[in-house]
Amino acid sequence: MAGVSLDTKLTGVVGGRSSDPLRKSLDIQTVGDLLTHYPRALQDIGELSDFLQLEDGDHVTVIAKVLTVVNKPYKVKATGRQAQRTELSVTDGQRELSLAFFQQPWRVKHLRPGTIAMFSGNVSVFKGRRQLAHPICETLGFGADLDEFAEHEVPRWVPIYPATAAVSSEKIRGCITQTLLVLEDVPDPLPDDVRRSHRLLTYDEALRAIHQPADPREFERAKDRLRFDEAFVLQTVLAQRRQQTLALSAAPRPRREGGLVTRFDAQLPFVLTAGQRDVGSQLSADLARAHPMHRLLQGEVGSGKTVVALRAMLQVIDAGGQAALLAPTEVLAAQHHRSITTMLGPMAEAGMLGGDAEATRVELITGSMSTSRRKESLLNALSGVAGITVGTHALLEETVQFAELGLVVVDEQHRFGVEQRAALTGKVKDMSPHVLVMTATPIPRTVAMTVFGDLDVSTLRELPAGRAPIQTSVVPAAERPAWLDRAWQRVREEVGKGQQAYVVCPRIGDQGLEPTAADEAAYDEEPGASRRPPLAVVDVAAEVSSRHLAEVRVDVLHGRLPADGKDQVMRRFTAGDIDVLVATTVIEVGVDVPNASVMVVLDADRFGVSQLHQLRGRVGRGSVAGLCLLVTEADPESPSRQRLDGVAATSDGFELARLDLESRREGDVLGVSQSGRRSSLKLLSVLRDEEVIAAARTAADEVVSRDPELDQHPALAAVVASLLASEQASYLEKS
Ligand code: ADP
Ligand code: MG
């Protein structure tokens, strides 16, 4: 067969009978797809054993002929489910051995009597007979004399592939062997000097060695090379993106003395922390440049990111531009609008009685606003009257236009993707606006390098002085019901002292309505999670006011309330007219009510690590110490309970981020949906492979700065293009 390359359709190479199931169940269509379906492990087949030597517990490999094969139904004891066992009897010519496969009835067709095959597995004794249960097997021939195979070359190391019900590991191995025989030399996407300086195999060598390694060392070397590629291609994309940003121009917005920033600073009721000042001058310098700023500001919950961002916005307004602040939820957008308006005071009252001569205006645009209010906001953004426009996704719509958009701030960035940032930044003709992305979810360095490789990073590590620490305790409601009573009592005490409380539930509840996606997610099974449905806001609120806290003013906040309803509840809670707010995670990000001092999270095991960390950041924001009680019925030994203990034990967001990422799958780290599509990262772990990523980044930067369009590196350019073209590129966009 001539000209088989990675792009060749598999059908023509292995035939439709083999390629169809591969396509249907693993989405493998080309030779490249097949060869990048890497083994998950290497199995040691060992030496060929003699039937005489088979001892209970040994791992053995034998070559034998099938005598009989039959499927037998049986009942699985634990579940009562009907299942199939395939029983074989095989011989070495003299003695016999039993084999069994479970739930693989198709084996009867592949292992008809007379088939000669190699079987490898553990010897056990079943009903007095020696057997191999679910061995790996490789068919060698049919009907012939066993002796012909006595000298058969058995590969010592056999790769085991991720398989499905329709396509077994052996089947995949067979197709790969067939394909490698006809595959032409594969061009190397890695520039030669990079490959040499990192002492890596060539691509062709690695691709063959990972499937047919002579030994585990060669297998590892192949993986090293292919893992480096994954990091390198990704970093090449990001390096190109950084180069493109450098080529863009932005209107410089240098600091102007005596403007809004100066006046804002003069009236601040507190002193900025050293970190706030440092990051502030970083931003100020970025904004003064003729290139767009692309900066990620990460800082602990409550570290005061909003003030930092507001000062940047004011600098832009002082320099004749406008700013847009994008928030992930309506609650948060409304709160930002409210608090920014308050913080600015007369400075935000342009055109109003008592407003400053040099004042500006702060507008709000959300999806649920009335048409007339929205019209006014739109007009003020378009005319340039609005210095700051705060909004949700609604800001991204085409109808929203600005006179002179100079800065886009994205709050709590993990809910927005790059393409959404692009929708906003695209609103500026010819020039690009400066962009500041804020997140309270700390990101390990490697993830930042991979996912946010096109952003510069600033970090706020300290909390404002005088901030009382948050104390977190786990309340095991099942083992210690008295502790739960005590938790409610604490809420009562705090309210008695004039403080306020949050009670958080995983679900909204409210019969008669379809569960929301969040409700569904809350049901997601996890070992150790409680079996009953998760607690719901509606039910808990009723219970709290009738039983636990009768004399206390209780209200609810969740995603199903109409927008103005949500806003009203938040206003009343902020004003102190509600003592206890029973809510879903709508309060997770950014909600800022300094008088709230205690939070009870019910069914806390239903929440993720960073979610809990975000949630508890809602209390202890004033001068009063915060208390967070994580109520759970999860088993003390369960992973979810241990996760809660971890959250209670530390308040270091960076440590928690690591804990969180470790408990999640790689795909989630990158934001790839679990749609079953192949990911382009198969061997690379953004958590473990920090060194590889850093090395690949340096190498990619060098290559791209010498050859931005990759004209000298056609093979690399092709791989980059196909990564960008594939749906997989979406993880570069989402974050
Ligand atoms: P986050 O980083 O979580 O967004 P915020 O910006 O909402 O934090 O700030 C949390 C609270 O701390 C706000 O009430 C804010 O006014 C206050 N704050 C911000 N900076 C300081 C400071 N330097 N000193 C005292 N309080 C501050
Ligand atoms: Mg915030």
Image (cartoon, grey):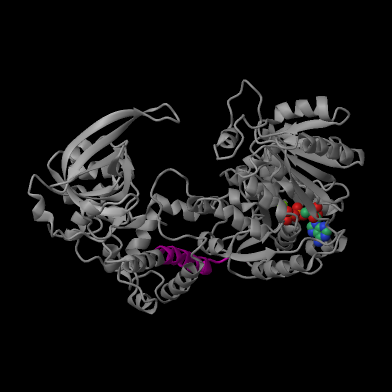
Pick the front one: 6 or 325: 6
Q: Quadrant of the N terminus?
A: bottom left
Chief SS of the magenta region: helix
Q: Is 225 on the left-hand or right-hand side of 119?
A: right
Judged from this view, the residue extending furthest toward the right is: 497
Pick the front one: 45 or 686: 45
Residue that appears at 62% across and 35% down: 530
Determine whether 614 is above or below 264 in the image. Answer: above
Observer able to see residue 387: no
What is the x, y in percent for residue 350?
Answer: 80, 51
What is the x, y in percent for residue 204?
Answer: 26, 67
Q: Is 274 on the left-hand or right-hand side of 75?
A: right
What is the x, y in percent for residue 28?
Answer: 29, 48
In the rendered image, residue 235 lying in the magenta stretch gets the answer yes
Image-quarter location of ligand 1: bottom right
Res 511 quadrant in image:
top right
In the rendered image, residue 572 lying in the magenta stretch gets the answer no
Res 127 quadrant in image:
top left
Determine whether 377 is above or below 286 in the image. Answer: above
Residue that appears at 41% across and 71% down: 708
Pick the front one: 76 or 60: 60
Observer able to see residue 619: yes
- Count of all numbered marks drawn on residues in the image: 0
What is the x, y in percent for residue 91?
Answer: 17, 45
Residue that appears at 71% across and 26% down: 539
Determine whether 618 is above or below 428 in the image. Answer: above
Residue that appears at 29% across and 47% down: 135
Q: In the image, which residues are magenta?
A: 230-251
Determine whether 678 is above or below 109 in the image. Answer: below
